[in-house]
């Protein structure tokens, strides 16, 4: 089998603040292959928010003049190239139909033009193409001249959970799943959903970036600067996105009321409308931190006495496998979660899966006073078995098997 490059189109931009499966995949692939990471394109509409968007600000020359459109990202042990493609047209607000389809094709043409230029400049010939959960643009590549060895589509979770993709994503994801050579899914529920649509289906749940979360922390007792004023108050932590379709706000409020002497910290994006509607800003011991750099997340997890996943048990969350699960475990923290997905059962010996609100509250109370070092080590061992290193290794084996069967 010939050496090949990896061209990866991502829904998340490489320098987003929160944990990113796409970035972790790019880092691992780059250890053994040339990796070209295509950032999610900005639209002309984004220019109106230029001054408020730091990511766009540092890319403005690339977007307007094509200067500096390639960024070399050093990972510490390898590197990969990021392409900032040109601007496209804002069309997500349009209803499904002819107008949307025509403009989407135009956006796809603009993106493909940038990708082709990159292929010429870097002499990319033999490559696999990975579309990581962004089926509305280039779900697969059919080009005759630049035909990939394989098309891979990676489904991160139920597409209806992502607000931007809710309107047009489901139909286009169906196309991606049908025409990809390999499809990876992060949950058993998604595996059942797509089992009759693709013969190259693979269960590949989210994992932990071992370089980030298994690295020893200097002064583990020292809290992040924005939590220094909390003193020695025990922290119950949720690292993730607060959204009414994901998070059980009733449970979150009950948790805060049950432990008024503790601090419930949320590190991640939240919806301001939810904060006001559910009066989260009026809960005295709930601290909404907003996004933090992904490199800083281990420090927040380290400062927690207990970590939680307070997700709603609904149809959407059945297809969700949160990255935070193995990230919590990698740091040996007690994990209390609702029973939102069957995928959690594989971890039931090292986490507590609550069957009710009262069970959740009781489990948090017990975990706060935990002193069993043996279970701490068991959690770290389990996380070490579920790293992005092992996930990419498994995917590479699938790729090699598929290429060998195709005679490539």
Image (cartoon, helix red, strand yellow):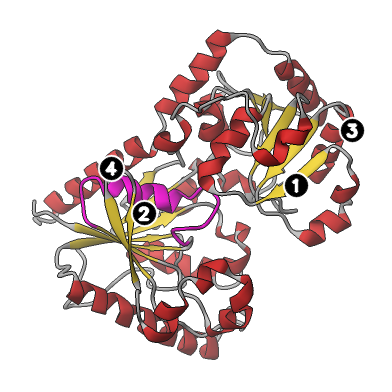
Q: Is residue 123 left or right of residue 299?
A: left
Q: Which residue is mark 4?
A: 77
> What secondary structure is marked by label 3?
helix
Badge number at residue 257: 3
Q: Position of residue 115 (x, y in %)?
A: 30, 75
Mark 4 crowdedness (10 Å alpha carbons): few <14, some 14-19, many ≥20: few
Report how far apart the C-alphas of labels 1 and 2 lie in the structure: 36 Å
- In primary-sequence order, the first of circles 4 and 2 is 4
Circles 1 and 2: CB atoms closer than 8 Å: no
Q: Which residue is mark 1?
A: 288
Question: Depth check: 104 or 223 in front?
Answer: 223
Residue 28 inside the magenta-drawn segment: yes
Mark 3 crowdedness (10 Å alpha carbons): few <14, some 14-19, many ≥20: some
Residue in the image at 18% along x and 69% along y: 122
Q: Which residue is mark 2?
A: 183
> What secondary structure is marked by label 1?
strand
Q: Using the rendered view, name the quadrant where residue 384 is placed.
A: top left
Question: Depth check: 153 or 306 in front?
Answer: 306
Q: Is residue 96 left or right of residue 277?
A: left
């Amino acid at each position: 089998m010939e050496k090949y490059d990896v061209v990866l189109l991502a829904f998340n931009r490489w320098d987003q603040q929160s944990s990113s499966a796409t970035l972790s995949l790019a880092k691992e692939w780059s250890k053994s292959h040339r990796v070209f990471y295509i950032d999610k394109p900005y639209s002309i509409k984004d220019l109106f928010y230029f001054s408020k968007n730091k990511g766009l600000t540092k890319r403005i020359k690339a977007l307007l003049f094509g200067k500096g459109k390639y960024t070399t990202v050093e990972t510490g042990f390898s590197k990969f190239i990021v392409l900032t493609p040109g601007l496209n047209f804002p069309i997500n607000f349009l209803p499904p139909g002819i107008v949307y389809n025509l403009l989407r094709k135009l956006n796809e043409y603009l993106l493909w033009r940038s990708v082709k230029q990159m292929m010429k400049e870097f002499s990319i010939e033999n490559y696999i193409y990975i579309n990581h959960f962004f089926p509305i643009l280039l779900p697969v590549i059919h080009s005759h001249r630049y035909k990939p060895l394989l098309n891979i589509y990676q489904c991160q979770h139920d597409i209806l959970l992502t607000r931007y993709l809710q309107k047009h994503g489901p139909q286009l994801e169906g196309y991606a799943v049908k025409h990809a050579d390999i499809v990876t899914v992060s949950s058993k529920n998604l595996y059942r959903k797509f089992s009759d649509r693709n013969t190259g289906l693979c269960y590949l749940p989210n994992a932990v970036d071992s370089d980030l979360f298994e690295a020893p922390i200097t002064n583990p007792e020292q809290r992040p600067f924005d939590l220094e004023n909390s003193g020695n108050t025990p922290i119950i932590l949720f690292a993730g996105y607060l959204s009414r379709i994901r998070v059980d706000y009733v449970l979150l409020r009950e948790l805060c009321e049950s432990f008024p002497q503790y601090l419930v910290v949320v590190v991640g994006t939240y919806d301001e409308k939810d904060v006001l509607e559910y009066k989260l800003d009026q809960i005295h011991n709930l601290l909404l931190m907003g996004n933090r750099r992904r490199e800083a997340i281990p420090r927040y997890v380290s400062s927690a006495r207990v970590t939680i996943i307070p997700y709603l048990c609904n149809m959407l969350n059945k297809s969700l496998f949160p990255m935070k699960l193995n990230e919590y475990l990698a740091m040996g923290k007690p994990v209390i979660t609702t029973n939102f997905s069957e995928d959690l059962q594989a971890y039931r010996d090292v986490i507590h899966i609550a069957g009710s609100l009262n069970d959740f509250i009781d489990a948090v109370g017990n975990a706060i006073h935990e002193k069993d070092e043996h279970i701490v080590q068991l959690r770290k061992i389990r996380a070490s078995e579920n790293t992005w290193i092992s996930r990419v290794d498994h995917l590479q084996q699938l790729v090699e098997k598929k290429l060998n069967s195709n005679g490539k």
